[in-house]
């Protein structure tokens, strides 16, 4: 019984939250990796692009709520996602047309494109803050919990409760769907294959008649979908604040590089690697050992490897270690 | 003279703008803008050495700035004797353990063949070392932080004049740059950018949460100043005489003696804060000028030529027998040290150290905007970038307010759109920075004052 309690404890505090957080990071990391693989630059505007998409979704959610439309137990934001995606894609294509395409045609070095993306980051951040303000916004509605701790305790008769928020399940579920569709698209369809070819060897791809404009456009469209869904899921699960989204860029980058930048599957797993290591290393295991070990060996300290203040630092340290020993990432990068 | 014409014009316009602020807003604001412009200029010079001379991307400017600030605290705050008594010895022992770990790892790295066993040795040394560190430091940190937590709760510093910290800050930042450079300089440009950005976040996390070091997010306030305090100045006779002399024209217009006295005391209060700011300006200007002379000399020296050769063609420079790795490391350390000086200057100017305020937007990306806008590779350009961008950063809000009022003048004052726009005035600075950066990168990719090398 104690053993079961210990497992539930880990599930409740580590595995479920880490899966949800990892899914959110994974979507962002695939976004970074796609841009890096096909457009060949590190996009520093990642976090702010996600916050732009989320902002549009929030505005639509408020509009729907004022009209009295809702999805019952599900959050209304789900209805707003498709509309937000459309806006996001339009925004990204506009930016590409007016900003990035110039440098792409000129074949500027990647560093210059990264600098330009910093300009885009400033502008996007300003637009988001001017429209919706810098404050914390919650836009979640519908049923909050799938299983509450008390219900679970009554159901199973265990000491430990298990809480599963509906947003967590929604996040994991939607991520699996989106990522499966994406991998199917990249591996099975002709357009997806042409994208991979373009990423692998640009000149060869151009020679075999792949239209670079089309590839770039589709990349931005996929990026828009990923950014909006990732951003909205994060906002539903936690809350929407432009500054947090900007900061999230850092673990997202870490996830993309750990997984091997340019490799979407690596980025997907990288998201979970970062999320799990952040939570594993900063969780206090005292209670866990109280269940597992016999009473005489009970620990009297918190048994926390690192204080939660260093949550971000963990992912960055992992990144630094990976960069040092395996610069191409856990999975070889640079090929879509 | 002709070749310097655009430099002189650009600087004249910049100074003119600051003087306009002094006339239309107030001299207090003008001088505080000027001081922070000077600090920004030092930071951009550091970044410019790395990017303009050597083509190294360093997105960790925030980390070096914070380390410079930390130096200011550790140098100027008087030591907390009680905290040293309860935990000082253990902390020194921890330092000793860290040094021991570093040297034993080095020993293993040098003296063992590349094998699995070597990795295991290194890993075990680090893990065992960390466990010992945890055991030794835990109670010590706890007892140090318990010493008057509302006022001190940290080890304190050396109690020296704060001006020394400008040098110490340079050493701190240079030391960090040595470690980062050893680790990350072999990476490709964009990886280096991301790695330095993340490492600087780690540095901030450590400073924020190690309360025994510099109180963390509880902030250190009331640092000693290298210049007089306003309150003391206001009671000094020579200062009052000076103010009276300076404002003779205004004071003579007032007929009654009492009115004159009241006006004078008001003027003294106002000018005392301006005077303090002028003192700071003098100090900062000295630093900027010294650094400018050194960097200009370096740029035109054989060393500077070698750096440009390495930047423009690494392989060719390597083939000519230049040690690219060593020179990259050197310039990485030098540039970061300059940023460290700026960090210490900033804390000196503010008189307080707030680790929570170090954010990448303000301390990394804004500095990069300055370097790109001003002109990378050109020290005059970098300084001008620091001035222009900081000026715009501060004055963006009034400019935006003016523009909003102009464009919405047809709307009623209670119009929701107008009110919303006026409320979000502070965020227009991001918009201006972004658009400015994008325009400059598109139409003048080498910056306002581009790099110009005269072969002598």
Image (tube, grey):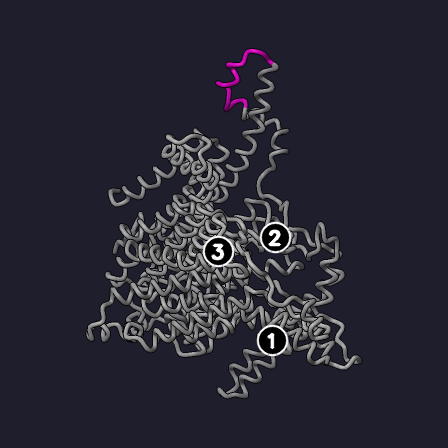
Query: Dot 1: what SS?
Result: helix
Secondary structure category for the residue under label 3: helix
Q: How far, Cα to Cα, is label 1 from label 2?
A: 27 Å
Q: Chain of mark 2?
A: B
Q: Locate residue B26, reporting x and y percent.
A: 48, 31
The magenta stretch spans residue A163:
no
Residue B111 versus residue A78 in the image, above or below: below
Q: Farthest top residue?
A: B255
Between B321 and B59, the one lying in front of the other is B59
Instruction: Judge depth for marks 3 and 2 and give the one in front.
Output: 3
Judge depth for marks 3 and 1 and give the one in front.
3
Please tell me whether residue B256 belongs to the stretch shown in magenta.
yes
Mark 2 or mark 1, which is nearer the start of the sequence? 2
Number of marks drawn = 3
Which label was assigned to residue B73?
2
The residue segment tinted magenta is B244-257
Compared to residue B152, the image places residue A104 above or below, namely: below
The spot of residue B160 in percent (x, y) is: 63, 51
Task: Check the image and name the residue furthest to the right.
Answer: A296
- Tell me if I can see residue A323 in this picture: no
Task: Identify residue for label 1.
Answer: B101
Name the quadrant of the C terminus of chain B: bottom left
> Which quadrant is the N terminus of chain B positioned in?
top left
x, y percentage for residue B305?
A: 31, 61
Location of mark 3 (residue):
B360
């Amino acid at each position: 019984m104690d053993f079961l309690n210990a497992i539930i404890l880990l599930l409740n505090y580590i595995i479920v939250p880490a899966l949800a957080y990892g899914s959110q990071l994974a979507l962002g990391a695939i976004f970074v990796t796609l841009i890096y693989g096909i457009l060949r630059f590190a996009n520093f505007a990642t976090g702010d692009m996600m916050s732009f998409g989320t902002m549009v979704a929030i505005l639509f959610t408020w509009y729907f709520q004022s009209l009295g439309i809702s999805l019952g137990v599900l959050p209304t934001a789900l209805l707003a996602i498709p509309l937000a995606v459309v806006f996001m894609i339009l925004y990204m294509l506009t930016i590409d047309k007016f900003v990035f395409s110039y440098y792409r045609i000129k074949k500027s070095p990647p560093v210059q494109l990264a600098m330009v993306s910093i300009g885009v980051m400033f502008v996007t951040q300003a637009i988001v803050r001017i429209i919706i303000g810098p404050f914390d916004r919650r836009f979640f509605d519908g049923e909050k919990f799938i299983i509450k701790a008390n219900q679970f305790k009554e159901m199973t008769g265990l000491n430990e409760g298990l809480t599963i928020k509906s947003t967590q399940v929604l996040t994991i579920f939607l991520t699996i769907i989106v990522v499966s569709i994406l991998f199917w698209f990249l591996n099975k369809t002709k357009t997806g294959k042409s994208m991979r070819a373009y990423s692998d060897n640009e000149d060869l791809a151009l020679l075999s008649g792949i239209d670079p404009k089309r590839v770039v456009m589709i990349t931005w469209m996929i990026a828009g979908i990923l950014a909006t869904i990732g951003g909205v899921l994060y906002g539903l699960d936690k809350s929407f604040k432009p500054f947090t989204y900007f900061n999230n860029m850092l673990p997202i980058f870490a996830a993309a590089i750990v997984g091997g930048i340019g490799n979407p599957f690596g980025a997907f797993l990288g998201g979970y690697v970062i999320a799990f290591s952040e939570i594993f290393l900063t969780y206090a295991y005292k209670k866990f050992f109280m269940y597992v070990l016999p009473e005489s060996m009970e620990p009297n300290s918190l048994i926390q490897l690192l204080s939660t203040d260093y949550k971000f630092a963990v992912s960055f340290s992992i990144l630094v270690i990976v960069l040092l020993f395996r610069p191409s990432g856990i999975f070889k990068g640079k090929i879509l | 003279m002709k070749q310097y014409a655009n430099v002189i014009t650009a600087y004249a316009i910049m100074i003119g703008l600051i003087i306009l602020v002094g006339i239309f807003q107030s001299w207090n604001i003008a001088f505080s803008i000027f001081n922070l412009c000077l600090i920004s200029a030092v930071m951009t010079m550091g970044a410019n050495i790395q990017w303009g001379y050597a083509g190294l991307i360093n997105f960790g400017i925030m980390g070096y700035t914070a380390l410079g600030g930390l130096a200011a605290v550790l140098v100027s705050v008087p030591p907390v004797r009680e905290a040293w008594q309860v935990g000082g010895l253990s902390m020194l022992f921890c330092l000793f353990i860290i040094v021991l770990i570093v040297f034993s790892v080095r020993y293993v790295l040098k003296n063992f063949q590349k094998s699995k066993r070597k990795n295991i040795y290194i890993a075990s040394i680090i893990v065992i070392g960390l466990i010992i560190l945890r055991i030794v430091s835990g109670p010590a940190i706890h007892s140090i932080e318990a010493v008057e937590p509302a006022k001190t709760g940290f080890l304190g510093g050396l109690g020296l004049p704060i001006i020394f910290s400008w040098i110490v800050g340079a050493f701190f930042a240079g030391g960090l740059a040595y470690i980062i450079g050893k680790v990350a300089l072999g990476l490709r440009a964009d990886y280096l950018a991301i790695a330095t950005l993340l490492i600087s976040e780690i540095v901030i996390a450590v400073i924020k949460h190690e309360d025994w070091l510099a109180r963390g997010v509880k902030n250190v306030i009331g640092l000693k100043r290298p210049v007089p305090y306003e309150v003391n100045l206001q009671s000094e006779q020579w200062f009052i005489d000076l103010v009276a002399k300076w404002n003779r024209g205004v004071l003579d217009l007032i007929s009654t003696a009492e009115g004159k006295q009241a006006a004078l005391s008001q003027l003294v209060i106002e000018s005392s804060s301006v005077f303090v700011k002028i003192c700071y300006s003098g100090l900062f200007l000295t630093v900027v000028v010294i650094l400018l002379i050194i960097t200009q000399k370096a740029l035109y020296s054989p060393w500077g030529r070698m750096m440009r050769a390495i930047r423009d063609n690494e392989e060719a420079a390597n083939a000519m027998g230049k040690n690219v790795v060593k020179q990259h490391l050197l310039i990485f350390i030098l540039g970061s040290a300059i940023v460290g000086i700026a960090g210490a200057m900033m804390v000196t100017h503010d008189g307080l150290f707030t680790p929570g305020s170090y954010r990448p937007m303000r301390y990394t990306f804004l500095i990069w905007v300055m370097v790109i806008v001003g002109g990378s590779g050109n020290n005059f350009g970098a300084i001008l970038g620091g001035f222009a961008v900081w000026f715009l950063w501060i004055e963006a809000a009034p400019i935006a307010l003016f523009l909003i009022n102009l464009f919405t003048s047809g709307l009623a004052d209670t119009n929701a759109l107008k009110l919303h726009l006026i409320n979000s005035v502070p965020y227009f600075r991001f918009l201006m920075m972004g658009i400015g950066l994008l325009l400059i990168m598109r139409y003048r990719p080498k910056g306002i004052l581009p790099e110009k090398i005269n072969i002598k």
